[in-house]
Amino acid sequence: MAEGTIKKLTDKGFGFIDTGTGQDMFFHMSNVEGVSYDELQEGQRVSYDDGHGPKGPRAENVRVI
């Protein structure tokens, strides 16, 4: 599993993870595990699996570390 920091959360149920590589990883609220999307905060460390969605790369199985 890769790790990163939540960079941005939106009111529309998706966000972006700073992967540390210069490219942010998109994630959707349906890919969050262990907590609800509303409990996430920008700056939290998370682990995730690399996945691929209809619009490109996305984080799956997102969990707070």
Image (cartoon, grey):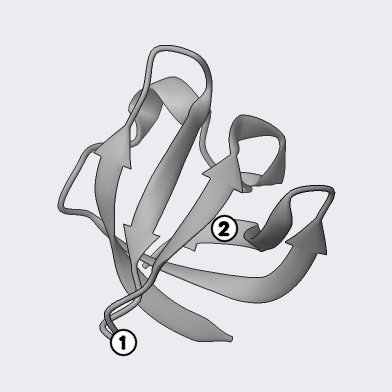
x and y percentages locating residue 16 in the rendered image: 39, 49
Q: Quadrant of the N terminus?
A: bottom right
| Residue sitting farthest toward the front | 55
Query: Image quarter for residue 52?
Result: bottom right
- Asked if residue 30 is positioned above or below residue 26 in the image, the reply reads above
Residue 32 horizontal/vertical position (percent): 60, 44
The residue that mark 1 highlights is: 21
Q: Residue furthest top?
A: 11
Between 57 and 2, the one nearer to me in the picture: 57
Left or right of residue 5: residue 33: right
Within-10-Å neighbours for mark 1: few <14, some 14–19, many 20+: few
Quadrant where the C terminus sits is bottom left
Q: How many marks?
A: 2
Q: Amino acid at mark 2?
A: Val
Q: Is residue 27 left or right of residue 56?
A: left
Relative depth, front residue between 28 and 39: 28
Amino acid bearing label 1: Thr
Give the numbered dot on residue 62.
2
Tag 2, which secondary structure?
strand
Position of residue 52 relative to residue 31, above or below, is below
Mark 1 vs 2, N-terminal side: 1
Q: Residue 46 got which mark?
A: none
Question: Could you tell me residue 15's position as x and y percent?
Answer: 43, 39
Pointer 1 with pointer 2, Cβ within 8 A: no
